[in-house]
Image: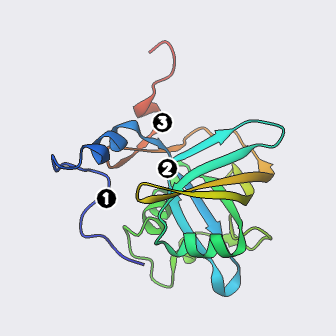
């Protein structure tokens, strides 16, 4: 795991307009986990999309050089967790932006499952299986099929925009305000 010297999403350099655009779009923060026992890996991902159909799909852009990508491409199963405001430290650790003495899976309680470690404090999560990959820019686009889904009332989702974690209400105030 690498702790970055600078924040990877602020993109203040004029030469990286694409990074600056991506930072302004923002998105709900997810944690993707895979593997078991000795092969566990995880990654914070905010470039995520859900597609409806006879079988739901989750698409995401992941870092192809991450431990998560290597393990996920090998075993083809993962758990996708929607993170809450209270999960800021988890998001930082799995993004490689904060230290995790003893490893990232010690930051919170996880339960081993057939698709990977499941973050017990995450109310909404999906077990997914890899369907397809494509190289897109400097990322790998993964298309997954949802095989198990638990949706909870999310009252305080963690959002990432312009290099900072924010409460959803800061980004999208309730209607009528």
Residue drawn 69% across the image and 84% down it = 37
Q: Is residue 146 left or right of residue 38?
A: right
| Side of 77 where 62 appears, left or right | left
- State the residue at coordinates (44%, 64%): 95
What residue is drawn where x is 34% and y is 44%?
23
**Is label 1 in contact with label 2 (beta carbons under 8 Å)?**
no
Front of the two marks 1 and 3? 1
Label whose residue precedes the other's in the sequence (3 or 2)? 2
Distance of mark 1 from mark 2, alpha carbons?
13 Å
Q: Which residue is mark 3?
A: 168
Quarter holding residue 118 = bottom right
Local packing at callout 2 (Cα closer than 10 Å; few below 14, some 14-19, many 20+) is many
Of residues 1 and 76, the one drawn nearer to the viewer in this rendering: 76
Residue 96: percent from left, percent from top:
41, 70
As drawn, 7 above or below 22: below
Residue position marked by numbered label 2 in the rendering: 46
Please say if 49 is above or below 68: above
Q: Position of residue 132 (x, y in %)?
A: 67, 57
Cβ–Cβ under 8 Å for marks 3 and 2: no
Q: Residues within 10 Å of mark 3 (few under 14, many from 20)?
A: some
For the residues marked 3 and 2, what is the alpha-carbon distance in whole angstroms?
Answer: 13 Å
| Sequence order check, earlier mark of 1 and 3 | 1
Q: Nearer the viewer, mark 3 or mark 2?
A: 2
Which of the numbered marks, if any, corresponds to residue 120?
Answer: none
Frontmost residue, 135 versus 168: 135
């Amino acid at each position: 795991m690498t702790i970055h010297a600078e924040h990877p999403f602020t993109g203040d350099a004029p030469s990286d307009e694409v990074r600056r655009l991506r930072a302004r779009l923002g998105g709900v923060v997810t944690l993707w986990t895979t593997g078991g026992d000795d092969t566990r890996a995880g990654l914070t991902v905010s470039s995520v999309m859900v597609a409806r159909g006879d079988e739901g799909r989750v698409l995401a852009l992941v870092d192809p050089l991450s431990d998560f990508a290597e393990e996920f491409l090998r075993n083809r199963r993962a758990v996708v967790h929607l993170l809450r405001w209270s999960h800021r430290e988890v998001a930082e650790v799995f993004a490689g932006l904060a230290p995790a003495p003893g490893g990232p899976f010690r930051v919170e309680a996880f339960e081993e499952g057939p698709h990977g470690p499941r973050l017990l404090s995450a109310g909404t999560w999906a077990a997914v299986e890899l369907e397809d990959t494509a190289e897109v820019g400097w990322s790998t686009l993964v298309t997954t099929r949802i095989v198990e889904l638990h949706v909870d009332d999310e009252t305080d989702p963690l959002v990432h925009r312009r290099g900072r974690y924010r409460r959803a209400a800061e980004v999208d105030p309730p209607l009528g305000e």
